[in-house]
Image: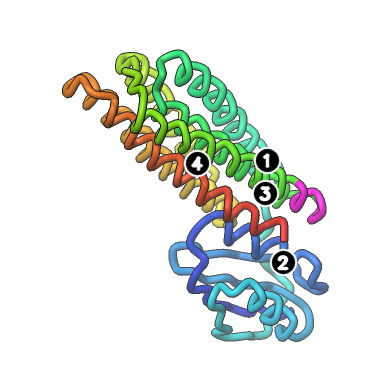
Amino acid sequence: MKKTTFHIAKMDCPSEEQMIRMKLSDVEGIQNLQFDIPNRSLQVFHEGDSAEIFKQLSVLQLDTSQLESISIEERFIQKSDGRERKILWTVLLINFVFFLIELITGLISKSMGLVADSLDMLADSVVYALALYAVGGTIAKKKKIAAFAGYFQILLAVLGFAEVLRRFIGMKKMPDFSMMIVISILALIANIICLHLLQQGKSKEAHMQASMIFTSNDIIINGGVILAGLLVLWTGSPYPDLIIGGIVFLIVARGAYRILQLSK
């Protein structure tokens, strides 16, 4: 068996990791993939030559270079599929429940920040679902889910951003800052719990590390919505909520575009 190490300069988010997994899923001889996302490194444990692996990685245009390829004994770290599935199902359910909570309360409180954050929770739910398919499932299923989820999220992000612009230009509805703050604090607690569960898993697999990156970003977004609620209270203006909402809708649209790359 061989261990080939690649440096992938543009591998910096969950979407690229999923793209790589699906691209290499049809390459014969691959036994395991070990990612180091912070260092943008990928180790492939495989039989035979590494030329086909490098070719498939190059197609993704992520600035890939091969560092080394060495022969090793037929031993590598096995994935703890059962434990990973349990953790991913837990964080998936938490995120989907809070997607519904934030969407409903965002509409009731007239807060675009909460509505946008709910879509970000939905985007995370999609990433966790794809991560579950990384633990098991077929490439065809992954591509179908990625395509549907990507287009659906882009549609919602465009509609949401259009509503933000409409409120900027026309009727400026005052959001309920108290509901914004309370729900965002609850969402923040939920994301902290998710991050704790993911970290306790101590997995070095990329789909788990990628999930931790997404959840860490969510904590920052939750803080932004809380800040927007406080600024609405302080200024008596809906603009802080609209600005935060617009920023998060753009983040959701960017994430949806990357998810769409998985369906190609």
Where is mark 2, residue-wise? Answer: 23
Using a 10 Å C-alpha cutoff, classify the residue at mark 3 as few (fewer than 14 neighbours), some (14 to 19) or many (20 or more): few
Residue 50: percent from left, percent from top:
71, 83
For badge 4, the amino acid type reads: Gln
Using a 10 Å C-alpha cutoff, classify the residue at mark 4 as few (fewer than 14 neighbours), some (14 to 19) or many (20 or more): few
For badge 3, the amino acid type reads: Ser
Residue in the picture at 34% in, 32% down: 168
- The quarter of the rendered structure image containing the C terminus is bottom right
Q: Tell me where residue 222 sits by quadrant.
A: top left
The Cα–Cα distance between marks 4 and 2, rounded to whole angstroms, is 29 Å
Where is mark 3, residue-wise? Answer: 80
- For the magenta stretch, what is the residue range? 138-144
The residue closer to the viewer here, 156 or 206, is 156
**SS category of the residue bearing label 1:** helix
Q: Earlier in the sequence, mark 3 or mark 4?
A: 3
Q: Earlier in the sequence, mark 2 or mark 1?
A: 2
Using a 10 Å C-alpha cutoff, classify the residue at mark 2 as few (fewer than 14 neighbours), some (14 to 19) or many (20 or more): some
Q: Report the residue that reaches farthest toward the left.
A: 234
